[in-house]
Image (tube, rainbow, N blue to C red):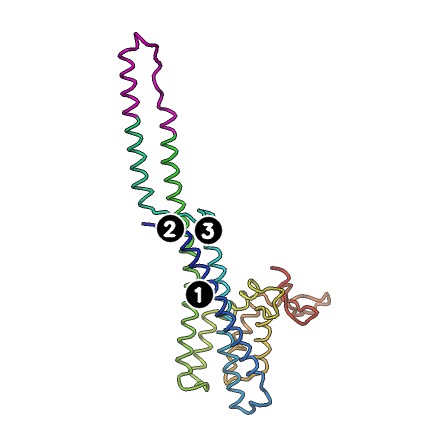
Amino acid sequence: MKVLDVSIVIDELDKISNKRESEKEQVLTLKKSMDSFIGLESSLKGSGGNAIRAHFAEMQVPLNILLQQFQDKYIETLGSIKDELFSFESREAFLREDFMTNDVQTGLEKVDKMTTDLIEGINDDYVSISDLVPFERINLTDFSSIVEEGKEHIEDTTKKLIQVDKSCVNLIEDAEATLDQLSSFVTKMQTWTKDGVFLSDQEYKELEKFYNESNVMKEIIENAEDLSDVDDNDNYMNQVANMLEMASKTTGVKDVIKNSLGFAVLSSGMLKVIEDGKGNLIIKASAKWKQGSNGKYVCSAK
């Protein structure tokens, strides 16, 4: 049975959205702290210091960006659910599927039968005196049409309620799938770092396998193009560009992120190969990835 109290649902969606906005700011603040830490090249020297910086660049930064992107997409999902609800009913609406399909439907049928019986009784009474009083039978067609329209409206409303429910569930399931991926990433990271930030050869192999099989890096880049705000200095395209730069400045034991990022950058269309007219091939940034005069990246071809 579907029950929809629009006002309660909208209020809860707003609360969740506001909470996610607050959490996103906290995650972004953490990201900035990690960026500063990774940039301490002069303070964190040697193989040990470099390994620590690489740990954050190769594991913590991608997870942080992915988490920010999930929060933005989730906030968008909540907005889409609100749109679905408002396209169906007003904020004050309260609907119950069983009430519409049982109580209202039964009520209409009962009214229809009672009215029909009453009119037929009146018609029969008039027939008995029709030789004395001019009489034209009362026609039930208009009333029956109204009742049928009411039944059709109930059926349409019920279908729409079920469809809205289905659409909202699909939106939430998409968000849950991304959350499952994040949870998997976190769980694996906890396993890999249980003995500290210095990973074993086997743990690096597992990390590289996870990146390659999950397409995390490619997803981060594609999400950056979809979610970046050209007016936001911390937009995801800038964050991805910074991640690439940090990866080039750190040298992890196995350079895991460089291998995964290299494949992701090429497969995402972030770069393109063009011919210069002289038979030479040149690698250039795609139209989407262009630096503005302020050095920030903007998605110019969304």
Q: Quadrant of the C terminus?
A: bottom right
The numbered dot on residue 178 is 1
* Dot placed on the residue nearer the N-terminal end, 3 or 1: 3
Tell me which segment is drawn in magenta. 116-145
The alpha-carbon separation of the residues under discs 2 and 1 comes to 27 Å
Q: Amino acid at mark 1?
A: Thr
Q: Is residue 96 above or below residue 216?
A: above
Q: Specify the label residue 4 is tagged with.
A: 2
Residue pushed farthest top? 131
Cα gap from disc 2 to disc 3, whole angstroms: 12 Å
* Residue 137 is covered by the magenta coloring: yes
Q: How many numbered discs?
A: 3
Say which residue label 3 marks. 84
Left or right, 127 with reference to 70:
left
Residue at image point 51% right, 64% down? 72
Q: Earlier in the sequence, mark 2 or mark 3?
A: 2
Residue 136: quarter of image: top left
